[in-house]
Amino acid sequence: MTFTLTVSDEVRTLAPGFTHVAIEAYDLVNGPSTDDTSALLDDAARRLAARLDGRAPHEDPHMVAWRAAYTAFGAKPSRTRNSAEALAKRALADGGLPRINALVDVYNAISVAHLIPVGGEDLDHIKGGMRLVRATGGEDFVTMAAGERAVEYPEPGEVVWCDEEGVTCRRWNWRQGPRTRLTEESVNAIFLLEGMGPDAGLEAAGAELAELLEKASPGARITVHEPVG
């Protein structure tokens, strides 16, 4: 890995079952959503429905484990859902999943199909390495409010992803900041697939995501890093 990605001991103590797979990708091709990425999202929703077989997303064992982790750091999981559960609810609702851009559509499809949190960050906007830590409460989280730049601060003890400039994602994977998100101009990215427990299915999901990225960007340099627990 050409940059560092670390999980703090405090987070590992909080959630010893946490694992993640990182995929580094360079020279990607991105742009607006396409018919192909839209079809991927529709297929992901069908795969999710088959997996759940009539259950609500939060009743899936993997989401139960994520809810326990959120509760452990003080979040209310019924109000602050992890990204996979939030997307799953949208996928099953009228209107379905949003279409954002090609790269985001692809990783959202993987998240929904496998019911795991998946995030994508623009490597050209990451400052230094990325760290998963428990916040002190003084870290900057730059976001937008009413079209204007705004700074928020995580709760003390909240699990956050951050780089040298500040928080990139609050409440583990609940809310990504605009500074590092993937836009239509993004060409270099890190994709992070996160799981709780040995049966999260990260390897299969990571392999499928890498295959889709290679298909969409034939000249891209893509490296899948083994699960880290």
Image (cartoon, grey):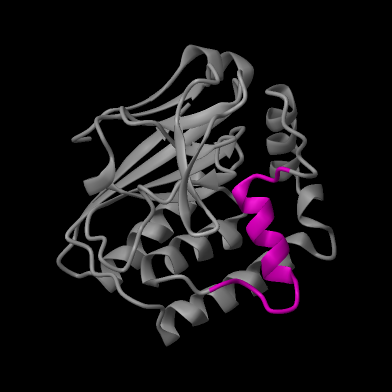
* Residue 25 appears left or right of 226: left
Please provide the residue range marked out in magenta.
80-98
* Residue 92 appears left or right of 126: right
Q: Residue at x 64, y 71 (%)?
A: 45
* Residue 114 appears left or right of 8: right
Residue 19 sits inside the magenta stretch:
no
Q: Quadrant of residue 228?
A: top left
Residue closer to the observer: 122 or 12:
122
Q: Quadrant of residue 66?
A: top right
Q: Is residue 60 above or below residue 216?
A: above
Residue 178: percent from left, percent from top: 42, 51
Residue 48: percent from left, percent from top: 67, 65
Residue 63: percent from left, percent from top: 71, 44
Q: Is residue 179 above or below residue 42?
A: above
Q: Is residue 201 in sight in this rendering?
A: no
Q: Residue at x 42, y 82 (%)?
A: 36
Q: Residue at x 41, y 78 (%)?
A: 33
Tally the marks.
0
Q: Is residue 70 in sight in this rendering?
A: yes
Residue closer to the observer: 95 or 59:
95
Q: Is residue 36 above or below residue 119?
A: below
Residue 97 sits inside the magenta stretch:
yes
Question: Image quadrant for the N terminus?
Answer: top left
Residue found at the far bottom of this picture: 35
Q: Is residue 191 above or below residue 44?
A: above
Residue 104: percent from left, percent from top: 43, 63
Q: Residue at x 52, y 40 (%)?
A: 194
